[in-house]
Image: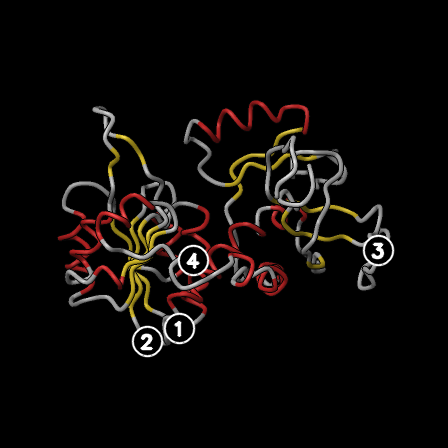
Amino acid sequence: MALLPRGIGLDVCGTVTAIGVGVSDVAIGDRLLGPADYVNFPTAGASDYAVLSHWAPVPEGLDPIAAAALPMAVETACRYIALLDPKRGETLVVNGAGTMIGFAAVQVALLRGVRVVATAGPTFADRLRALGAQVTGHGDGMVERLGALLQGLPDHVLDVAPVNLTPEGVIASALPDLVRVAGGDPKRVVTVTDFAGAAATGARTGMEEITSIKDVMQYDKVGIYAAYAAEGRFSIPVSRTFPLEDWREAMDLSLGGQARGKLILRIAPETQG
């Protein structure tokens, strides 16, 4: 059961200052990245100190700001790609590839040799194309534009787009359109975000096949993709950095839907952690 109070911020990159009982693979002074253990401790990433239950070393040559952007996006993207399990040469549609989970999922799939057709706004569309994805925009005509790119049915569809409200206060679910893209087969569609839409359309959420979320978490992949990032083979866009004391400004920007990449809080300019 989660303890209260809980802070904000899921991702951490920094230097080890204390080690828990039974931990033998790290030492004081090591530089690590990982998710803050907000489930078992009253801790979070927006803090001077955070408790980690899962971690990976920061590879040589990886900037700590770039490292801090990785954990949550990598773990979530790897978890859903593992669920879909697209094979080399298959086609995956990623709806919402301009989100950080979507941006990560595109790269994870491409590294597996999967063909990726993505939807994204103008902020990241060109970057996604440069990675090797085929990209079209959201909105009216999306089904037809995806169909023109696909030239057939996709093997898998992953929805990571935020669930938004229309001006009338109605949830604007993309899942009915994505089921159409999948040839009417909702089981080809998995959503990370739209649980109400999944219930209405029959799309999957990834929770149907598991008894415990802990059993499918992909924390072991964070170190792998950190190594890829150090080699220039993987990245999560960083929009801005803020001093820790400006966390409210960063949170307001994030909640306003205008982040356009990861927002990183740093404890001190010289550490950039």
Q: Is residue 158 left or right of residue 151?
A: right
Tell me the residue at 34%/47% (across/down): 96
What number is the disc on residue 21? 3
Determine the CA span between mark 1 and mark 2.
6 Å
- How many angstroms separate mark 3 from mark 4 (CA)? 35 Å
Could you tell me which secondary element the residue under label 4 belongs to?
Answer: helix
**3D distance between C-alphas at marks 1 and 4:** 13 Å
Residue 113's disc is: 1
Quadrant of the snapshot with the C terminus? top right
Give the number of the mark in front: 3 or 2.
3
Element marked by disc 3? loop
Residue tagged 4: 105
Q: Disc 3 or 4, which lies upstream in sequence?
A: 3
Task: From the viewer's side, name the closer residue of 28 and 80.
Answer: 80
- Precedes in sequence: disc 1 or disc 2: 2
Q: CA distance from mark 3 to mark 1?
A: 41 Å
Please tell me in which quadrant of the rendered image residue 133 appears.
bottom left
Chain-order first, disc 1 or disc 4? 4
185 shown above or below 53: below
The picture places residue 196, in percent across and down from the top left corner, at 30, 43
Amino acid type, callout 3: Val
Disc 4 marks a residue whose amino acid type is: Ala
The alpha-carbon separation of the residues under discs 3 and 2 comes to 46 Å
| Nearest to N terminus: mark 4 or mark 2 | 2
Q: Name the mark on residue 89.
A: 2
Residue type (three-letter) at the residue carrying disc 1: Gly
Whether label 3 touches label 2, CB < 8 Å: no
